């Protein structure tokens, strides 16, 4: 089976020939270790494509993520300002809205004219044409709740879930529509078979189980219903300890839920197996960055033995990895899964 076939088999709840394995995103690591910056690639689709293709061969991940680290441009295209950093993903300098009146002034179609967003799309298409028969080539964005929080500001969003819940629901719905608008042409023309979303502000460390059900699930379900209607898979990552809400994850409609290292992977297997493919959850800092090669091997084997021997599972770090993770640790992470026959 190709890497792509291996991943999609797991997404469908099946048992592939080996354990599927991938980083989540990996943009910071790839760009830094390719010897360039986010700013240098932002408007150069050919260079971005070369980086994605060359780093896919170096990393050997089953999934290649176009646009990893460029997530904030989907908000900035509506009128925000981006701040580039020497190392690390570009930041959105300040929120865009504070009221429903502000929300009504935003035009989703403005994202079609953003140069960096269009660069990522072009690089996605070129990368797909080069390696898309072998690997899953996806494009990543913030999930609805996180994108909404970028528009409003994270602190203001947290307060609004208590003080202005109807406003929060409207912003999340707007963000969901923006994501559908972003992805629709790429799904319709066959470029994307898998959509990648990261919803870190829906983290178990930031919002309660009740808030997750009220504010995060509706946008995710609306998006995944749309994706499924188009025949596309959805890979969803949520940060933080989400052990208390594992049973809610099938309600998101995602094809696969990627779990933070704080989440109990044994409980995840008990709760999710047979209902949704799940992925995780090697600690990206304590193990991938700070651990030895042996630490990586031991951790990966323990996670697979606990959660991944029956299929419908993907070995992943618990979040995106830092840009200075030793390459030898990534190699071992990939090797353990690739050599684990199911």
Image (spheres, rainbow, N blue to C red):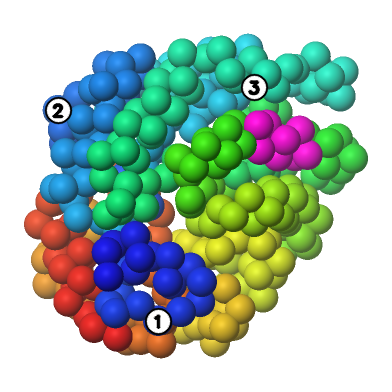
Q: Can the viewer see residue 29? A: no
User: Dot 1 lies on which element?
Assistant: loop
Return the x and y of residue 36 as percentages of the image width and height: 19, 24
Residue nearer the viewer, 8 or 98: 8
Location of residue 274 in the rendering, given as x and y in whole percent from the top left corner: 57, 83
SS label for mark 3 = loop
Residue 246 quadrant:
bottom right
Q: Nearer the viewer, mark 2 or mark 3?
A: 2
Instruction: Give the Cα separation between the discs numbered 1 and 2.
Output: 38 Å
Disc on the earlier residue, 2 or 3: 2
CA distance for labels 1 and 3: 44 Å
Q: Residue at x 27, y 30 (%)?
A: 49
The reply to whether dot 1 and dot 3 touch (C-beta < 8 Å) is no
Give the residue number, with chain letter if any, for mark 1: 15
Question: Disc 3 designates what residue?
Answer: 95
Identify the mark at residue 35; answer none if there is no mark.
Answer: 2
Q: Which residues are magenta?
A: 172-181
Quote the CA–CA distance across marks 2 and 3.
Answer: 31 Å
Label 1 packing within 10 angstroms: few (<14), some (14-19), many (20+): many
Q: Is residue 51 visible?
A: yes
Residue drawn at x 58%, y 18% as measured from the top left: 112
Quarter-of-image position of residue 286: bottom left
- Quadrant of the rendered image containing residue 107: top right
Q: Camera-side residue: 272 or 329? A: 272
Coordinates of residue 287 in the picture (x, y in percent): 25, 63
Q: Local crowd at mark 2 within 10 Å, few (<14), some, or many (≥20)?
A: few
Residue at left offset 20%, top offset 55%: 60
């Amino acid at each position: 089976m190709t890497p792509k076939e291996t991943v999609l088999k797991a997404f469908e709840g099946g048992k592939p020939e080996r354990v599927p394995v991938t980083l989540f995103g990996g943009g910071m690591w790839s760009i830094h270790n390719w010897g360039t910056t986010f700013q240098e690639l932002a408007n150069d689709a050919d260079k971005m494509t070369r980086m994605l293709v060359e780093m896919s061969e170096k990393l050997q991940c089953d999934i290649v993520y176009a646009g990893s680290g460029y997530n904030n441009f989907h908000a900035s295209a509506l009128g925000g300002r981006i701040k580039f950093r020497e190392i690390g993903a570009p930041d959105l300098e300040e929120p865009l809205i504070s009221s429903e009146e502000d929300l009504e002034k935003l035009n989703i179609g403005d994202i079609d004219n953003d140069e960096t967003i269009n660069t990522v799309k072009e690089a996605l298409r070129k990368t797909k044409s080069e390696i898309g028969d072998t690997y899953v080539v996806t494009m990543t964005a913030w999930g609805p709740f996180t994108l909404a929080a970028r528009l409003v500001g994270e602190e203001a969003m947290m307060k609004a879930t208590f003080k202005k819940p109807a406003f929060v629901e409207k912003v999340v719905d707007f963000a969901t529509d923006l994501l559908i608008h972003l992805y629709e042409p790429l799904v319709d023309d066959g470029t994307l078979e898998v959509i990648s979303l990261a919803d870190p502000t829906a983290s178990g460390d930031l919002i309660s189980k009740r808030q997750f059900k009220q504010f995060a699930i509706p946008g995710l379900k609306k998006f995944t219903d749309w994706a499924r209607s188009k025949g596309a898979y959805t890979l969803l990552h949520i940060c933080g300890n989400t052990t208390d809400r594992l049973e809610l994850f099938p309600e998101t409609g995602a094809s696969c839920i990627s779990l933070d290292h704080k989440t109990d992977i044994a409980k995840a297997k008990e709760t999710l197996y047979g209902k949704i493919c799940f992925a995780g959850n090697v600690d990206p800092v304590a193990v991938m960055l700070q651990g030895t090669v042996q630490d990586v091997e031991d951790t990966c084997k323990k996670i697979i033995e606990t959660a991944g021997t029956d299929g419908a599972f993907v070995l992943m770090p618990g979040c995106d990895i830092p840009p200075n993770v030793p390459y030898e640790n990534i190699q071992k992470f990939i090797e353990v899964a690739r050599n684990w026959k199911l």
